[in-house]
Amino acid sequence: MELSKNYLPASVEEKWYQQWMDKGYFRSKPDGRQPFTVVIPPPNVTGVLHLGHTLNETVQDILVRRARMSGFNACWVPGSDHASIATEAKVVNMLKQEKGIEKSQLTREEFLKHAFEWKDKYGDIIYHQIKKLGCSCDWDRVTFTMDDHYYKAVITVFIDLYKKGVIYRGARMINWDPKAKTALSDEEVEYKDIQGKLYHVKYAITDAAGTPTGEFITIATQRPETIMGDTAICVNPEDERYTHLKGHFATVPLVNRRIPVIFDTYVDKEFGTGALKVTPAHDINDYNLGLKHHLEIVDTLNDDGTLSAAAIVFVGEDRFVARKKVVAALAETGLLVKEQEYTTRVGYSQRNPTTVVEPRISTQWFVKMAEMAKPALDAVVNGDVRIHPGDRFLATYKYWMENVKDWCISRQLWWGQQIPAWYAPDGTFEVAATAAEAAAQFAARNITISAAALKQDEDCLDTWFSSWLWPMEVFNGISQPGNEDINYYYPTSVLVTGQDIIFFWVARMIMAGLEYKDVKPFSDVYFTGMVRDKQGRKMSKQLGNSPDLLELIHSFGADAVRFGIMISSPAGNDLLYDDASCEQGRNFCNKIWNALKLVKMWEQRQEDDTAADAAVSNFAVKWFESRLNEVQAEVAALHKDFRLSEGLKAIYILIWDDFCSWYLEWVKPGFEQPIAASVYRKTVYFFEQLMQLLHPYMPFITEEIYQLLTARAADDSLMMKQFTTPEAPVHATLLEGTLAKEIITGIRDARNKNQIKPKDPIVLHVETKHDNTFKQLEGMLAKQVNASAIHYVQEPVPGCITVVIGKDKFYLGTEIELDTTTQKATLLKDLEYLKGFLVSVEKKLSNEGFVQKAKPEAVEAERKKKADAEAKISVIEESLKSL
């Protein structure tokens, strides 16, 4: 079979993914093996995979493939999230733009029908991308958070927590998204520092009888559009400027409403004017002051962010348009004292990043979090759930869990699990799965009402209230407790996710798992970093700096994209994405492909082991075997610590440098010469081992090369090939290999500097105290540096090029007339560098602080550096004398 010039990924990827699917290699069923379970963080059904997803799915596939090849029953469950806010917004926009239909014109059932049609149309796009990336998910287990069984599980949990008193309904200050027209949890608000303005406004003072005193009190506000909702002016009781105002009132500008002047130590008399306008409907701190002082609540905003009728002026105007008009009106009436530039923090909706959230008093459903948080905190602190990298995220996790607030779980949306609360006409309610059950519960309270007369709560549940059950309900653990799958696969093994949802999802899954299974949902959590562009900016659609995954795969191939995203992504650290990383991955694929072509060329040129250069190859074989064993053990250790990027780097160096650049060159037969059969077999074996080691990272090219190296049985697949425990590497052989590489590199460099062509032979004289070490390298050295003979000497050989490597000297004899000036310049340059290096080492060793505080092995390493540098300096100085 003739191999293509370069590796062509497209046909290879399609072929192997389909074969893996056809043979059922991704499927998992409970058996006697130890399970290795991973549940995919369900991407939103609304869109396409971005590079953050690409990193996340690649990491999961690496872990799953390696586990499968290590004897585990690997099960990777795919799925997607219904994403209430984002999906409903998409469907609403689609209906308006494509069909001219407003949501308000539809019944809930009609809207949900359109939403499910949207999901069916776009939901598979994400799965297609995950497959193109090579992910080995069990596609028979795809789960969607609005599947019937999942819907049932969410409702079951809601009812259970309500009965336990963990869920309650009440009026509280919440965060409101005016664009989505829904409540948000505190965690769904992202704060940004912006440059705003502070407006100083005068309020006229009246006495208790309502008579103007002619005095004004000035307040400073960032939000003049809320002035119409003011219900008090608050000052510090110890502020002498205002003590005389006790029992007085202020007049709200523009609407002329009389409000009391109240006193509370909450106000900082040193900040601003020392006077605070209190707007209980639009600020959490003002709300708390209002409760304390029994103030009226005047809500001046509609749910879409426009001014309500309660505002009296500028009714119906958008809040930010109204701000400008209020400022203008205040200036016109002489009540605006001044405007001041001001840096402040403003909360934005995570789902609508350009929308400023509004604090708002609203009746919502909440989960009491403090009680559930404690066992979830303990599980991480005591190491039952291990976070990677723990040094970065453990403190963050602890802080949030120790300061957790109640969770607002109701959303004013239709796309999602509808809250199972049923209301009688008088507003009383029962929480139940059906109207019939609710009617029965009313009857138990001696209230007779028919199921038909009950009205279900219009709100749906926060998306995270469904996804916190994900590790359990993908195995029907809530809807069918005790089934075979949940008993076998749960708790799962590893959760791979982004650091930005540590509170939204990770912490809550631990809470839910401990609540409903009395056990952690996973053993390890691996946090990936944030993918950023070359300028350090977060990838986003708004900036247009996030490349399309399918286009990347089309340009570079899936393996190259996986390589590119992994080679620069240490656990938890942000990574700067650059197409150059994918190009490096493509070059790596071509390097491996060219190695395959070279090895296949030797297949028909095998000869019995009596071939002339078999002895030369034997050292290469022994060295590479030790090197392979060394890296196999290293990669296993790195995987255990979730240092996947470092594992890839170790494999990359092993294949590119050690195998392709050194080993294949050492065993390569001469032009049209045979190769020893045993060496060829070993080379194919090494190649197979390398492909197995690399397979979890780059599955397609490794499977292709594995199949092309030699004839295989139909059921012999690399992805199912089991890892074996590597033998211990021979340390002495590794050192000899390193020495051989240094000698060959040094001699080739000297030949090049002295303009000795590769085809021109040299005579090599070696001055060393370790003749035995070099004797077994002779044949290989002679071949690699084109030496016609190798001799051992005890003193310098005149008329030769001198090369110093370690403590040994090599004299290159040639018939070409030599320029000793070049040699001398090279040696002097090396000498200067070594003397400078020696000074730096000696300075370090003379530092008593370093010697006393550093680890003994670190101090010993510096002493060895000193001894080696001194020995090399001595050798170079002797060589210079001979010149």
Image (cartoon, helix red, strand yellow):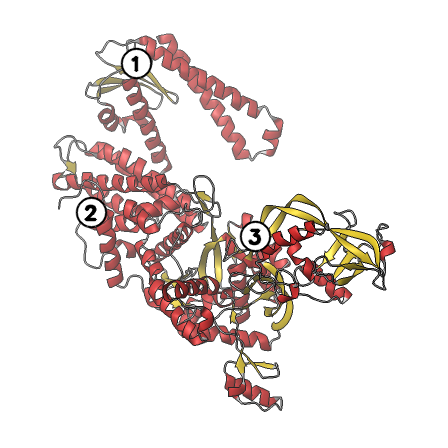
Q: Is residue 448 left or right of residue 32?
A: right
Kindly identify the amino acid type of the residue bearing the numbered disc 1: Ile
Instruction: Please tell me whether residue 266 is drawn above or below residue 479 in the rendered image.
Output: above
Viewer-nearest of discs 2 and 3: 3
Query: What secondary structure is marked by label 1?
Result: strand
Kindly identify the amino acid type of the residue bearing the numbered disc 3: Leu
Q: Which mark is residue 278?
A: none
Instruction: Please tell me whether residue 446 is drawn above or below residue 277 in the rendered image.
Output: below
Q: CA distance from mark 2 to mark 3?
A: 47 Å
Q: Which mark is residue 394?
A: 3
Residue that carries the numbered disc 2 in the rendered image? 709
Mark 2 near mark 3, Cβ–Cβ under 8 Å?
no
Q: Which mark is residue 801?
A: 1
Residue nearest the viewer, comparing 622 with 754: 754
Viewer-nearest of discs 2 and 1: 2
Q: CA distance from mark 2 to mark 1?
A: 43 Å
Kindly identify the amino acid type of the residue bearing the numbered disc 2: Leu
Rate crowding at label 3 as few (under 14), some (14 to 19) or many (20 or more) other CA atoms within 10 Å.
Answer: some
Residue 815: x %, y % from top left = 21, 11
**Which quarter of the image is occupied by the C terminus?**
top left
